[in-house]
Image (cartoon, rainbow, N blue to C red):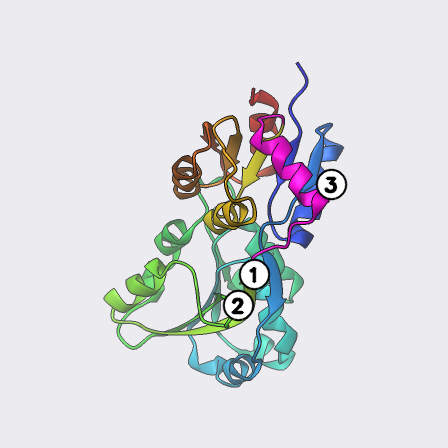
Amino acid sequence: MAAKPVIVTRPAREAAQWVSEFRAAGLKAVALPLIVIEPAADAEPLRAAWNRLPDYAALMFVSAAAVEHFFLHADRNKVAATGSRFWATGPGTARALRRAGVPDEAIDAPPADAVRFDSEALWERVRGQVSAGVRVLIVRGGDAAGDPNGRDWLANEIETARGLRDTVVAYRRLAPFFGDEERAIALEGAAGRAVWLFSSSEAISNLRQAMPGTGWQAAGALTTHARIGEAARAAGFGSVRVCTPLREALIASIESFT
């Protein structure tokens, strides 16, 4: 039996890349971005963070989008001169740092064969870098108003270790607009004729807001973290699997999804 089509819900640019890779592997795939990435409404905090770069022992990036929007305001001379570490939660974020010109030896991330890619896995790698008075900058996304959103788990760990942490919003995460084409794709997924691929609990929330009253009992979801899987089950998805967000593992999981 041929694999069901997969609906990729990452932000537009990442979704297009994943769709291309899945199609190259012989899968049917379509992009339905459920998070819209926009620049931060106020760029001054980003410029101020660059001016303070030597104050930070480490900079933690929550996503590739955080890297890209932060480095739009980059002072390349400071990147080369600073002794700061650059923390990445996963391989996509690490690749974005390399594209931005950060030397590989300055990047800390979970190993490529890690069971999961998240703040907990990253902290296992970097906790020894944080002690009393060590300052870390967390570069993350914000909501439509530009206020930081997302988990504070790693920030809390830094403070527990008596480190100092600052936060800067590099971009905004907005809900998508659904037209007729988007609704048609979503209804195919709701009916179980395609597999949903979620890499964010926020994407699931945005989907439910965009499709009020839709039942998801017939739908199947592949998620890239147990926490996202829990959100899918809570939303009513009838079949949920969790898979590490690595290309070959995802392809195998999609092919086996019935």
- Which mark is drawn over residue 20? 3
The range drawn in magenta is 175-193
Task: Quickly name the residue at label 1.
Answer: 174
Question: Closer to the N terminus: mark 3 or mark 2?
Answer: 3
Judge whether residue 147 is colored magenta: no
Q: Where residue 58 sits: x, y (%)?
A: 44, 70
Q: Does the image show residue 161? A: no
Q: Write the residue at 60% across / 45% down.
A: 9
- Left or right: residue 7 compared with residue 63: right
Identify the element where label 3 is drawn.
Answer: helix
Identify the element where label 2 is drawn.
Answer: loop
Looking at the rendered image, the quarter that the C terminus falls into is top right
Question: Closer to the N terminus: mark 2 or mark 1?
Answer: 2
Q: Amino acid at mark 1?
A: Leu
Q: Amino acid at mark 2?
A: Ala
Q: Are marks 2 and 1 in contact (CB under 8 Å)?
A: yes
- State the CA–CA distance, disc 2 to disc 1: 6 Å
Q: Where residue 216 sits: x, y (%)?
A: 50, 33
Q: Write the residue at 73% across / 27% down.
A: 26
Judge whether residue 186 is colored magenta: yes
Badge 3 density bin: few <14, some 14–19, many ≥20, Cα 10 Å:
some
Task: Quickly name the residue at label 2.
Answer: 144
Q: Looking at the image, which is closer to me, 215 or 224?
A: 215
Residue 28, located in which quarter of the rendered image? top right
Q: Give the answer, above or below, for where 180 lies relative to 172.
A: above
Q: Does the image show residue 123? A: yes
Identify the element where label 1 is drawn.
Answer: strand
